[in-house]
Image (cartoon, rainbow, N blue to C red):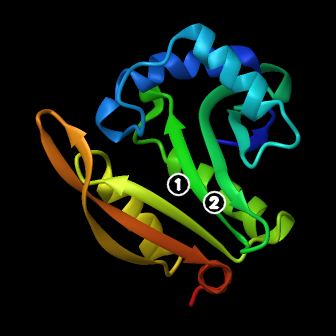
C-alpha cells in the first residue's frame, strides 16, 4: 500500500455519497446527502480557497504508480481556527477497503499536514459511541491524545448516544514520531 494525499475531484465526492450509506451511525448529518448537495458542497467548501476546511483525497498508487491510483478515502481538517491553532479531523474510507490500515495511514498523512505544513497546535475529533469508537481511541493512544466523554450527542436508532471528544496536540504527535 502506497498512500498519498491529493486534491479531491467532484467524482471522488460523488463516490463518498455511496460510502456514507454504509455508516450512517457515524455521520454528523441526520440524512443522506443528494448528488446536487454534494456538488454544492464541493464548490463551496472543497474547491474554495477561502474555506475554513481542507479536504484531501487519499489515493493508493499500488504497483502501477500515480497514473492508475485509486481513491480509497477522504480525510479532512475542518473548522480550522487559525487564531487558536486547531481544527477538527474527519475521515471516511471506502467500505471495500476497511481493515487494510488505510484509515490509520490517512490519519498519519493528514496529521503531518496539520502539524508540519499548516502549523496547527492541536487537532480534535468527535466520535459517536454508536459509530467507530475503537478506531479513534487507538488513534488517540497512538498520538498521545486525550479524551473526554460527551453525553447525549447523537440521536441514532431511536436513542441518544454519547460521544468521545478527543484532542491530539503537536507535542503528542511529535512524541509518537520519536517512539515515546
Residue 42 as seen in the image, left or right of residue 25: right
Q: As rendered, which of 4 and 11 lies closer to the eye?
A: 11
The C terminus sits in image quarter? bottom right
Is residue 125 in view? yes
Question: Which secondary structure, mark 1?
Answer: helix
Q: How many marks?
A: 2
Q: Is residue 157 above or below residue 117?
A: above
Q: Quadrant of residue 126?
A: bottom left
The crowding category of the residue bearing disc 1, from other C-alpha atoms within 10 Å (few below 14, some 14 to 19, many at least 20), is some
Is residue 8 in view? no
Using the image, tell me which numbered label, if any, was put on residue 104.
1
Q: Residue furthest bottom?
A: 180
Quick check: marks 2 and 1 in contact, CB under 8 Å?
A: yes
Residue 129 as seen in the image, left or right of residue 20: left
Q: How far from the left and from the top, in percent, is residue 178?
A: 66, 86
Residue bearing the label numbered 2: 108
Q: Quadrant of residue 15?
A: top right
Q: How far from the left and from the top, in percent, is residue 112?
A: 74, 64
Using the image, tell me which numbered label, if any, was put on residue 49.
none
Residue at position x 41%, y 40% in the image: 28
The N terminus sits in image quarter? top right
Q: How far from the left and from the top, in percent, is residue 102?
A: 54, 44
Residue at position x 64%, y 21% in the image: 13
Q: Is residue 22 above or below residue 165?
A: above
Residue at position x 55%, y 23% in the image: 16
The crowding category of the residue bearing disc 2, from other C-alpha atoms within 10 Å (few below 14, some 14 to 19, many at least 20), is some
Q: Quadrant of residue 40?
A: top right
Question: Which secondary structure, mark 2?
Answer: helix
Q: How far from the left and from the top, in percent, is residue 46?
A: 75, 33
Q: As rendered, which of 98 and 130 lies closer to the eye?
A: 130
Inter-mark Cα distance, 2 to 1: 6 Å
Amino acid at each position: 500500500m502506497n498512500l498519498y494525499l491529493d486534491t479531491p475531484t467532484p467524482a471522488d465526492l460523488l463516490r463518498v455519497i455511496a460510502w456514507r450509506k454504509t455508516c450512517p451511525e457515524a455521520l454528523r448529518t441526520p440524512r443522506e446527502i443528494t448528488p446536487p448537495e454534494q456538488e454544492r458542497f464541493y464548490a463551496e467548501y472543497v474547491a474554495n480557497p477561502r474555506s475554513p476546511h481542507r479536504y484531501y483525497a487519499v489515493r493508493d498508487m499500488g504497483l502501477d504508480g500515480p497514473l492508475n491510483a485509486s481513491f480509497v478515502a477522504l480525510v479532512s481538517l475542518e473548522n480550522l481556527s487559525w487564531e487558536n491553532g486547531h481544527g477538527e479531523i474527519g475521515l471516511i474510507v471506502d467500505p471495500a477497503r476497511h481493515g487494510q490500515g488505510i484509515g490509520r495511514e490517512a490519519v498519519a498523512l493528514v496529521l503531518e499536514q496539520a502539524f508540519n505544513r499548516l502549523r496547527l497546535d492541536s487537532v480534535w475529533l468527535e466520535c459517536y459511541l454508536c459509530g467507530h469508537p475503537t478506531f479513534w481511541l487507538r488513534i488517540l493512544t497512538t498520538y498521545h491524545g486525550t479524551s473526554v466523554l460527551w453525553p447525549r450527542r447523537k440521536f441514532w436508532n431511536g436513542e441518544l448516544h454519547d460521544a468521545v471528544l478527543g484532542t491530539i496536540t503537536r507535542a503528542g504527535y511529535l512524541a509518537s514520531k520519536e517512539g515515546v
